[in-house]
Amino acid sequence: MFHYMITADGLLDFFRRLLEKQPVMGPRERPDQPGFYYFDWLDRAEDFALDYVTTAIPPKKAFFPPNETLFTFKTGNPPELAPAFEEFPFVLAGVHPCDLSGIEALDDAYSHPPAEHRWQASRERAMIIGMDCRPDEYCFCTLLGTSAHRKPCDLFLTPVGRGYLIEVHSQAGESLLDGVSRLDASRQELEEAEQWRLRKTERIVHTLRASLDRFADMLDAGGLTRVWKEVAGRCYSCGSCNTTCPTCFCFNIDDEYDLTLTSGVRKRTWDSCQLLDFARVAGGHNFRGDRWQRVRHRWQRKFLYLYRQFGRPYCTGCGRCSRACTADINILDVINQLIEAAQQEAADA
Amino acid sequence: MLEGRRNESVPENTVYYRPGLAEVLRVDKRSWEVLLELEMAGGPLAYQPGQFVQVSVFGYGEIPISICSSPTRNKSFEICVRPVGNVSRALYELSVGDRIGVRGPYGHGFPVAEMKDRDVLVIAGGIGLAPLRSLIHYVRDNRAEYRRLAVIYGARTPAYILFENDVKRWSEDPGIECLVTVNKADEGWRGRTGQVTEPLRELKLDRDRTIAAVVGPPVMYRFVAMELFNKGMSAEQIYFSLERHFKCGIGKCGHCQLNDLYVCQHGPVFPLSELLGRTEAIEAWAPEKDQD
């Protein structure tokens, strides 16, 4: 792997060049709420936020927007359908390691046969520039092994001194740097980057009271209804946890007529397993009609079903769901609460 | 074990969730449901009894519907729709010559290969007869390959009996034992009344040679399973087809998740042995319901 050093001004220049060639989506500060950041198309290189903590909505939206048109239709006989799919190439920049891991998780899920064509085609349009992060009290990536995640990025940035270390992770990434003034990184600069990352991870002081394998076994064994009901007693079933999650990928599909009532769009929108009607069928039967069943489903899907299917938790430790929770339910606290209950159960038996 | 059953090949028309067009060839409309005969514009649909399609009426939406015809008959296929939601009500209003969207077929159907040289027991409740009609016709059309064919069908009232002409034909066919029961009789009804479990109880089965296919409302499954267990059948011989509100059909949207399985992919037809250890298969286990 190649390592380069680039100055802060050089990085700005690099982004200017990028923007000349293709649209760039990256973290930028909300004009209406200074101090809060979101992923969106950058207008200028200066919009790119280098030191954001996190965003409310993860960058998965670059490939899987919260609300997207699958195709448009004109009613009539026969009805006419027209595909709707953007094809322009773009760069997704400023993605933290946890969010890279989230994109990889969705790569795994959506490419699992039968593959999802939309996700795959979207991913092929983009190059990804990762960036090191500044964790806050909700982050627990170190417990899930995502704090130094790189796949699937093409370039990765880490602040070193007054400049940035650039790791090159692909041929395409290398070609993005064509014509950009940079120096080969020295051993000392690599060491400094390592120190910076060490200081970063040392700030995360949370613990996970069992291994993920053990936790999956505990969920599988069941007998945790007491905890599910306790958490459900606090949960409002608002779905904020799902909509802010970088690894959630459930969706709904429905139609929307325009005002002419002769044409419209078929839309895909993010959906949430926490909402009451998520598992309801036409006859009115609801397979998760109780709130605690929906709460249980969320943890079981992330740490049992998908964990066993893909060999990784469908959680990156980004802490977004805990930050967003209207009832202040912290995902890691609930995990530890479940582990404790399972251990108690085992001790009693 | 079910991973091997996962359907990895996807019909062409799944790409980007854009359906193909199907023309309505025949509309058989009754008070409680409509039978639509459809023909795909791009050539016949290759399907198995028990599979489902995603049906679109543009502007109203898309819903999963099981195919109720047998692939042994026509190039066209049939669906049976009871108007309860926006899309099904729009389907109910269709006329001959209208074109709608269809993508699929999806999922795993009934184990027609495994049923060969066996006794086939079909148990249907209400609209559950729709996918089972596909199986019944399939077995009838390949009659020499199967042994006994018994059909037990329970409907709410005589007026709710689906495929009336078919049911009549099956009753007259010496090759089929067809037992029909209604929960609530009307004045003209001369047949049985009561739940499907009652004729089932009377039926003599060769327990080692029988494979049962069961489709009905969730509440029916528990009681039918109990009755079949009483007759000495094992969970491996009993197949249930489950209903979920599929949105994608390819195991992505999450709506049909049943514990670790996706009903659209691993099912919708499952051997009961695969459902016994799973809490979300038939009914949720907790009796109390949300107040919101």
Image (spheres, rainbow, N blue to C red):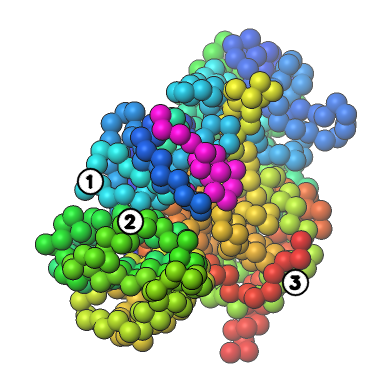
Which of the chains bears the disc numbered 3?
Answer: A
Stretch of the chain drawn in magenta? B81-97
Q: Is residue A143 magenta?
A: no
Q: In the rendered image of this protein, does residue A87 appear above or below residue B157?
A: above
In this rendering, is residue A198 above or below B155? above
Q: Please tell me in which quadrant of the rendered image residue B210 appears.
A: bottom left
Tell which of B46 and A92 is nearer to you: B46
- SS for tag 3? helix
Q: Quadrant of the C terminus of chain A?
A: bottom right
In terms of secondary structure, where does tag 1 sit?
A: loop
Dot in front, 1 or 2: 2
Q: Mark 2 or 3, which is nearer the eye?
A: 2
Query: Residue at left 59%, top 47%?
Result: B85
Q: Position of residue A45 (x, y in %)?
A: 72, 17
Q: Which residue is mark 3?
A: A230
Residue identified by numbered label 1: B73
| Residue identified by numbered label 2 | B165
Q: Nearer the viewer, mark 3 or mark 1?
A: 1
Q: Residue furthest bottom?
A: A349
Give how far across and how far down residue A292 sits, in percent: 68, 67
User: Hey, what amino acid is under mark 3?
Assistant: Glu
